[in-house]
Image (spheres, rainbow, N blue to C red):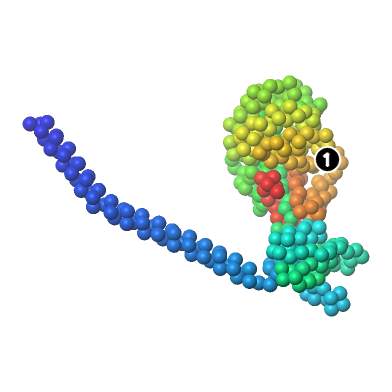
Amino acid sequence: MGKMKHIVAIILVFIILIGGGVYLLPKLIQQYSQSSSNKSSDTAVENSEQSLQQAAQDTLPFAERMEHVMEPLQTGYSKRKKRQIWTMGGGQTIITYLLQMQRFVKKNGGKTLYMEELYNLDASVFQAATVDLLDDKGDTLKIELQVSRNEYRPGASLLSVAFEVTDLTPEKIVALNKLDFPYDLLIPPFGLSDGFYNFLDKVKNKELVLWLTMESTKLNRVHNKLRPLRIHHTEEQIETVITDAMALMPNAVGIASRYGEQAVEHKQLMQAILKPAEKNHLWFLDLSTNKLSKVPQTCKDMTLSCKSATPYNPENSTLSDYTKFKMREATRNGLAVMILPLTTSALEKVQDLSVKAKSQGTSLVNLSTFMKK
C-alpha cells in the first residue's frame, strides 16, 4: 500500500511538471521571440544609422571628405599663393600627413600629381609642403599643408611610461596612486621581499610586466635569486622559469629584458624565451640597447609583438634631460617610451606629466598600446 502511494505521488508530480511545461513553454518562446525581435530591430536601426551616416559622408565633395579625414586645425585660402592653406596640428611630421593624404586620394579615386616639402618657413610653422592633386571628378586641388609649431591636435602622438621596480614602500604607493595616467610596472617576479605582492595589490591604474633577468656579463652569484635566463639553460628550464613567473604574476601582459645584452645576441636563447612568451600571449620588450640584438629577426616568424626601448641611464643623462628628450621624441616620431626607475625623484618628475603631454597633443598610454602600434 505504501509503495502504491509513492507511485501515485510520482505520477502526480510528472503530470504537474508536464502541465506546467505545456503552459509555460509557449510563453517562454513568445518572450524569447520578442527579445530576439527587439535585438534584431535595434541592430537594424543601428546599421541603418551607420549606413545613412556613411551615405551622407559619401555625398560630400572630395575636398570636404579629405578634410574630415585629415582633421586640420584651420583651413583658408591664399590669393597670393592661389592655394588652400591647411594648418595641421603639431605632434606629427609633415611626412606623416603627406602619406595620410596620399592614402586618402588613392582610396577615393583621386590622383596625386605633385608633392614638395617647403623650407624657410614662418616662425609659427614647424614643417610645410605643397600638394597638387586631382579629385575623383578630375578637378585640380592645390593645397599647402602647414604643421603648426605651437598648436597640437589631441592624440597626435603617444607616450608610454613604465617604472622599473625593485622595491615598494607605502610612500611610493601613494605617489603612484596620485598619477592621473596609465603606466606600467616592470616587476622582477623572483627574489622580492616578503609582503611585496601585498603592497603591489594596493597600486592602482597599473599594468604589469615581467622584468626577467637575462644573460649578461654583469651577472654574478648575487643574481641567482632572480633566476636569470642563461645561454646554457635548456628550453624546458627556460619555459619553467617563465611559467613560474606567470604563476606569481598572472595578470602580466608582457616580458621586458633586465640586463640581457648578451642574451639578445644569442638567437637560440631568444627563441627559447619567445616561444613560451608567445604561448602565454605575452609581448616582448628589449631594453638591452644592444645594436646587435637578434630579437627583431627572431620575432618576425612568430605571432607575438617585439619592440625595443631605451631606459633611463644615470651615466649619460639626468632625469630632466631624459624626460624632456622622450617628450620631444613623441612629438617628432608620434610614438615614444619612457622607462624610469621607481624612485622618489622619478615619481616627482612625472607628477605633472599629463598636463605637459596634453599641451603638446600627446596621449599617455600603457605599454600594451605602444606594442600594438
Residue 345 position in % (x across, y down): 76, 45
- Residue at 59 percent of width and 42 percent of height: 202
Write down the quadrant of residue 217 in the picture: top right
Q: Where is residue 297 in the image (x, y as percent from the top left)?
A: 76, 36
The amino acid type, in three-letter code, at marker 1 is Pro
Q: In this view, does 208 lie to the left or right of 141?
A: left
Q: Where is residue 275 in the image (x, y as percent from the top left)?
A: 66, 31
Tally of numbered tags = 1
Frontmost residue, 39 versus 301:
301
Residue at image coords 63%, 45%:
206
The residue tagged 1 is 314
Work out whether residue 373 can be spotted: yes
Residue 292 position within the rendered picture, expressed as x and y whole percent measured from the top left: 83, 34
Residue, far right = 120
Vertical arrangement, residue 295 with respect to residue 64, above or below: above
Near-viewer residue (358 or 192): 358
250 is higher (above) or lower (below) than 152: above
Which residue is pictured at 84% across the width and 76% down the height? 82
- In this view, the residue in front, 180 or 136, is 136
- Residue sitting at the far left: 1
Residue 249: quadrant of the picture: top right
Q: How many other residues sit within 10 Å of disc 1, few (<14), some (14-19) or many (≥20)?
A: few
Asked if one can make out residue 342 in the rendered structure from this viewpoint, the answer is no
